Amino acid sequence: MKVDLKSLQMRTLESEEFHLSTQGRDSLLSDIGGRFLEPVDVDLIIENTGNMFIGRGQVSTTIALTCGRCLEEFEFSMITDLTLTASESSGYGENEELIVLDDNQAEIMPRIEQEIFSLIPLNPLCSEECKGLCPLCGVNRNLTICSCGKNDYDPRWEKLKQLK
């Protein structure tokens, strides 16, 4: 996703709005079993400060993730603020956040993907009340009530019961 800053480049201390939408790369989420369900929408205001461009806006999308407890797929909607800085040259030190313009265009997709990936929880849950899978029979306890836990007998604990 590129933002063309050619028209803004000639107008110092002015800003321009950009409304962009693109399909996300499913390969970004493939390692965690996720995929994009909706396009990545970006609303951005970029200001020309004279020597660089400062952008502020929002990114929104919906992705499919797998619950860490019940292993069911669920929708995870995200909206996050985005701040970026772009310049014609990288002469502002070792700043990894700085986007260097190429032919008056700023490639902002790597920065957007970084923001999206940072919002994904380490252990995604379909809901806080998720009961997960039964460790004995494997049924989804959100959908079915199993009787495994009621007949749970472990002979290793029998000697402790005799200590009364």
Image: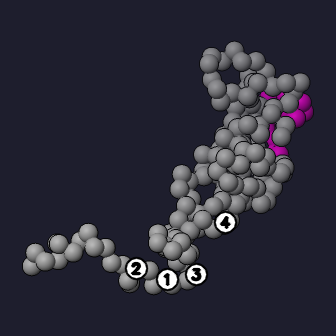
Helix, strand or loop status at disc 3: loop
Residue 35 visible, this angle: yes
Q: Position of residue 55 (x, y in %)?
A: 72, 38
Q: Could you tell me the amino acid type at mark 4?
A: Glu
Q: Could you tell me the amino acid type at mark 2?
A: Gly
- Earlier-in-chain disc, 3 versus 2: 3
Residue 143 image label: 3
Q: Is residue 11 magenta?
A: yes
- Pointers 1 and 4 in contact (C-beta within 8 Å): no
Residue 75 image label: none
Q: Position of residue 135 (x, y in %)?
A: 47, 69
Q: Which residues are magenta?
A: 4-19
Q: Could you tell me the amino acid type at mark 3?
A: Leu
- Earlier-in-chain disc, 4 versus 3: 4
Residue 73 image label: 4
Q: Residues within 10 Å of mark 3 (few under 14, many from 20)?
A: few
- The quadrant of the image that shows the C terminus is bottom left
Helix, strand or loop status at disc 2: loop
Q: Is residue 6 magenta?
A: yes
Cα distance, mark 4 to mark 2? 25 Å
Q: What residue would you read off at disc 2?
A: 149
Cα distance, mark 1 to mark 4? 21 Å
Q: Position of residue 76 (x, y in %)?
A: 65, 62
| Outermost residue, left side | 164
* Tag in front: 3 or 1: 1
